Image: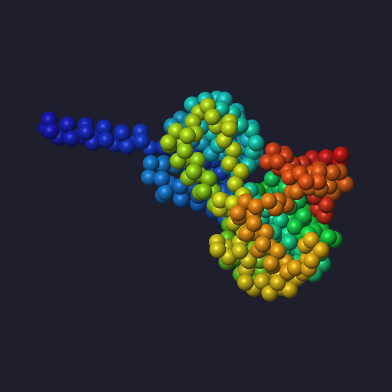
Amino acid sequence: MKKIALTALALALTTSAHAQDKLKACFVYVGPVGDIGWSYAHDEARKKAEKALPWLETKYVESVPEGQAMPVIDRFAKDNCKVIFTTSFGFMDQTLEAAKKYPKIMFMHASGFKRAPNMGTYMADFYQLYYLNGMMAAALSKTGKLGYVGAFPVPELKRHISAFALGARAVNPKATVSVKWINAWFDPNKAREAAEALISEGNDVLAFTEDSATVVQTAAAKKIPSFAHYSPMYKFAPDYVVSGQLVHWDKIYIDFLTKVKNGTYKIGNLNKVDYWSLMRGGAVELGAQDGMAINPKWVPQLKAARMTVNGKQVSVYDRVMQLKAEMEKGGKFDPFTGPIKDRNGVLRVPAGKVMSVADLNNMAWVAPGVTGQIADEPKK
């Protein structure tokens, strides 16, 4: 009996030691994990991180409305979560509040700009991809009128829509991007209605920020090309999805959690941690699906389309692929290089300057060519 008791005790101690060796990371999602967009991409990355890091344990709560994150964070704190990821812009202020409330927990907030000694920030941003997709959209449009279904008029979308418009106007200086806001991250019904309205107004290429495949399906039903958002959407409309923005959050999660585990990142220095991941490093990828930068069906049309670069006529396809390669290497080209005026004619980026990460994170204005109401847009 004594031997059995000792064996049981040893097993319990070993189990306890293993539990203590585990790092528990918990995730707050704004949408359902089945949305095929933002929250789905974060959850896929969570699974990849857990598979890659044997010492990692994870939990998540999905469909948490913005402004209602605190009860979920309180629950995670009681559940001994050591790292809490809040994965939507609208969670920013509550995450900062939670960081002060729970000084022994590490917080990481996606897409925001506020930090604290135990709260860092991270973003895998798409503005480079939107510029390239804007170029292709303008090349494929017969009318020069492009449509955009937008979730919320936050800085992230203003820079993405502006990059899309800047790319479009590099090909067609008269191109426009008409925006319809649905005020939701995930609402297939509103997304469909907005897409149909844009098409009825004569916009013949669509892009969007909404966490379902609704826009690409709606566009395909009208035989209109579109650009996928967040996840591989080629399978939903293989004849009409031209390209899109793909994300690989696991690149950030694995790197950050590894550095927490080895002590590089700790409470006290997270206010200096800000991941700003672009095409270089592979956290974001141009594509209709993984490994397919451009749908082969549309390549001939893009090769036939011409644009002017430094006074010379070049193929839009060649220019897109050239800039893609340059941005993947971290080259000098940046879509937000001045001089850039906003759509009201106010100079926002002086000649020779490039917008800083801070400026991009607080962007309120939009570029020329964008049409439609934009909340909180400065007039001067």
**Residue at image x 70%, y 64%?**
319
Residue 177: give x, y in percent of width and height. Answer: 79, 57
Q: Is residue 194 visible?
A: no
Viewer-closest of 337 and 78:
337
**Residue at image x 63%, y 66%?**
294
In the displayed structure image, the side of residue 301 where residue 236 appears, left or right: left
Specify the color scheme.
Answer: rainbow
Residue 28: give x, y in percent of width and height. Answer: 54, 40
In the rendered image, the quadrant that contains the N terminus is top left
Residue 144: give x, y in percent of width and height. Answer: 81, 64
Answer above or below: position of 295 versus 123. below
Residue 113: give x, y in percent of width and height. Answer: 65, 36
**Residue at image x 73%, y 73%?**
304
Viewer-closest of 28 and 297:
297
Q: How many marks?
A: 0
The answer to which quarter of the image holds residue 378 is top right
The answer to which quarter of the image holds residue 36 is bottom right
The answer to which quarter of the image holds residue 297 is bottom right
**Residue at image x 78%, y 68%?**
313
Q: Is residue 321 visible?
A: yes
In the rendered image, the quadrant that contains the C terminus is top right
